[in-house]
Each structure stands twice: as C-alpha cells, then as structure tokens.
Image (cartoon, helix red, strand yellow):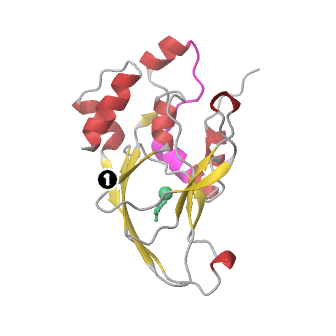
Amino acid sequence: MARRIMEILMKNIGVESDDSMAENYMGVRVVNMNFYPTCPDPGLTVGIGRHSDIGTITVLLQDDVGGLSIRVQEDENVGNKDEWLEIPPIPGALLINIGDSLQILSNGKYKSAEHRVGTTSTRSRVSIPFFLNPGPKVILGPMPQVIGKDGKAQYKECLFEDYKNNFFGHAYQGKKSFDFVKINSP
Ligand SMILES: O=C(O)CCC(=O)C(=O)O
Ligand SMILES: [Fe+2]
C-alpha cells in the first residue's frame, strides 16, 4: 500500500518511480507501539511533543480515544490561519503522514506534517505508527527531476543517518531539524 501511495505522490510531481526508489526511500520499516496513560490534569502534560516524522511516509493506526493534532500553517493564499487541528479517529481508518524525507525528496512540494499528541484524564490511548524510512546510508536530497523543473534545490544533500542524528538533537521542536539541510537564499 505504501509503495502505491509513493508511486502516486511521485507521479503527481512528474517523477516515475520504480522498485529501487521504494527500496531506497522506504526500505527501513519500523513499528512503534505508543501507550499514553491517563493524566489527572491533561493541561499539564504532553503525550508526544510537536514534531514531524523523519522518514518518507508513516502509516498510523490509532484507537478511538483521540488526541492527535496536526499543525496548519498560516497561508493567506488559501485562507489558512496558524492553528492546531484535531484529527479525530475514524474506525478502521489508517492515517498517512508525510515525513521530512519526502519533503526533502520533493524539494518542498510535499510538506511533512507537524503533529503532537495530548492525553485525557479518563482514558488511556494506544497508537501504532508504521514508519517507512530511507536506509541510514541513503543520500537524501531533492530529486533531480524535481530540481530540473524548479530550477533550484531548496535542500542540501545529506545521509539519512546524519539527518536522523541531527533530528534527535532537536527532538520535539517542531520542524527545526530542517535547518540542517535548508539552503538559505542569498
Ligand atoms: O500517537 C499518535 O497518534 C502519533 C504518534 C507519533 O506521532 C509518533 O510516534 O511519531
Ligand atoms: Fe509522529
């Protein structure tokens, strides 16, 4: 399923994907199991702090408790204001998150989703994210086909393991880890 999603997303930005691309950019698969206990005063705690996932795509299964929210960034062109939007669980649905690696590969055409998780005082919660990540030695950078069209790369190339190590040095600071690869315009 994730391969198919990747294929469609790539096609949408003019890149024909093949099996080697999926192997390269989604070859390392990690399943986590998150347990969020109840908290007597949820306003005083954080389930998971604000972050975006570092891999290519995340497939998330959540139970029916809720608590996940996604940051919408201000964009006057489409009338968005800066806010956190609750993502209510839908029975039987999987949630697909775009990760930082896909943002970098697509030269910013796709934006990784900044998200966070709150707790409740009444029910504990379980979620199971399935992360599809590049291998540690994969060179991550905007794909040549996309740069060709855009005329200019927004991000520098780096090894995925270096991106990951840098990310964990700035955990839960939203999308700060992009500073590591951003090319600043003169
Ligand atoms: O619990 C959730 O809904 C999201 C978990 C999450 O963001 C993560 O594990 O990276
Ligand atoms: Fe996450």
Which x, y percent locates residue 155? 58, 29
Which x, y percent locates residue 156? 58, 29
Which x, y percent locates residue 60? 37, 57
**The C terminus, quarter of image:** top right
Which x, y percent locates residue 32? 37, 65
Question: Which residues make up the magenta segment?
Answer: 151-165
Viewer-nearest residue: 160 or 115: 115
Viewer-nearest residue: 104 or 136: 104
Left or right of 184 on screen, residue 62: left
Residue furthest to the right in view is 186
Label 1 SS: strand
Left or right of 116 on screen, residue 11: left
Tell me the quarter of the picture where residue 57 sits.
top left
**Vertical position of residue 172 compared to residue 18: above or below:** below
Residue furthest to the bottom in view is 40
**Vertical position of residue 137 compared to residue 70: above or below:** above
Numbered-mark total: 1
**Vertical position of residue 185 compared to residue 158: above or below:** above
Instruction: Assess disc 1: are there few (<14), some (14-19) or many (≥20) residues with their C-alpha within 10 Å of its C-alpha.
Output: few
The kind of residue on which mark 1 rests is Arg
Circle 1 sits on which residue? 29
Residue at the image position 60 percent from the left and 50 percent from the top:
71
Asked if the residue at label 1 sits under 8 Å from ligand 1, the reply is: no
**The N terminus, quarter of image:** top left
